[in-house]
Amino acid sequence: MKNEVNPIIWLEYAESDLALAKTGKTSKKIKYSTLCFHSQQAVEKAVKAVLVFYRIDFPKTHHIDFLFKLLKQENFNVPEIIFETKYLSKFSVGSRYPGEELEIERKEYLETIKSATVVLKWAKAIINKSNKLF
């Protein structure tokens, strides 16, 4: 997979996913699992933005923990609160298909929004301090 080389674009996609996740259950047809998927995607893309910023190659993957390990291999210090969001990987696939869907309550959904918001803020802080490069 050829990775997009501009971390700002990765952040824009992460923001888009978070905005979708925050829309909430506006109808009975919307599943919490779908909203949690978008929280997971926001975190995944925000972490990938940081990887791109530091020019760390990554394969096509939805496993957030794997992406954090790539940062750690480069001796990048990931704050514990950020690292704790790796649990969101479970929403990347298992929450999206019949028979594999996770039972998710509103409280858990809201927690995914908080997690994604924290990671996106962290990624933006890293990338925006050197925004002049792009």
Image: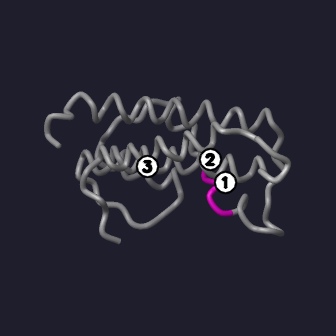
Q: Is residue 5 left or right of residue 36?
A: left
Looking at the magenta stretch, what is its main secondary structure? helix
Relative to 63, does residue 98 appear above or below in the rendering?
A: below
| Location of residue 25 in the rendering, given as x and y in whole percent from the top left corner | 77, 41
Query: Image point 30% across, 44% down: which residue?
Result: 8
| Location of residue 23 in the rendering, given as x and y in whole percent from the top left corner | 66, 39
Q: Amino acid under label 2? A: Leu
Q: Amino acid under label 1? A: Phe
Q: Amino acid under label 3? A: Tyr
**Residue occupied by mark 3:** 13
Q: Which mark is residue 88?
A: 2
- Identify the secondary structure beneath mark 3: helix
Q: Is disc 2 in contact with disc 1, using a CB cutoff of under 8 Å?
A: yes
**Residue occupied by mark 1:** 91
Magenta part of the chain: 88-93
Q: Is residue 14 left or right of residue 49?
A: right
| Location of residue 28 in the rendering, given as x and y in whole percent from the top left corner | 85, 48
